[in-house]
Image: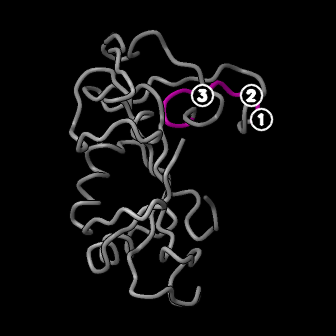
Amino acid sequence: MSCNFYLRLPEPRPVEDFPGETTLQGQHIGKRSSAGPYCWDCGITIAWRANGPRGWLDDSRERWGQDAVHGGAQNFLTCPLCDGMPMSEDLSRSSSGRELGHNHEPPARKTGVRSASSFGFAWYPQDFRAQVLKHGVVDEYGDEMTGAAFLEHLAKDCPIRFWGLVGQTFS
């Protein structure tokens, strides 16, 4: 469950002008994905992956936290730092619900152990903010927002950030 985001450009530009992929929507800047339970008070995900090959992390090391998100992870029963219990969220309030189109609430900073989203960046951080503020953003469904509104959305809804795909084409 995810949503791709693009710079809102008057017309698509050649790939040489911007890193990443150019589409009819504009220049791909990244992807928001539902990332499971996250302790908003401690600032960590409660995902973990035990030893052995599972998902895309095909090695024998145990992983937890951000390294386990999107890799066939399971979840701790409580936050490993504060022992906070995950709170129940239906699709009208959860990050999964946002990706499925059921959560229409504006993003707001949460507390306790609740759902969160991750954002995988397709741009280098030094270019990202300036270009987003200059052009604005459109998602894969055609919904547009100002650059400032998008950055606020990231701050409130996507505490997990991935920079490992910068410069690569992904969706």
Viewer-closest of 41 and 115: 115
- Tell me: residue 140, above or below residue 33: below
The residue positioned 46% from the left and 70% from the top of the image is 124
Amino acid found under the numbered disc labelled 1: Asp
- Tell me: residue 57, above or below residue 31: above
* Mark 2 vs 3, N-terminal side: 2
The residue positioned 57% from the left and 32% from the top of the image is 68
Viewer-closest of 15 and 50: 15
Give the residue at mark 3: 63
Give the residue at mark 1: 58
Viewer-closest of 78 and 158: 158
Q: Secondary structure at mark 2?
A: loop
Q: Secondary structure at mark 1?
A: loop
Amino acid found under the numbered disc labelled 3: Arg
The N terminus sits in image quarter: top right
- Tell me: residue 162, above or below residue 132: above
Q: Which numbered disc covers residue 14?
A: none
Q: Which residues are magenta?
A: 58-67
Q: Residues within 10 Å of mark 2 (few under 14, many from 20)?
A: some
| Rendering quarter of residue 67 | top right
Give the residue at mark 2: 54
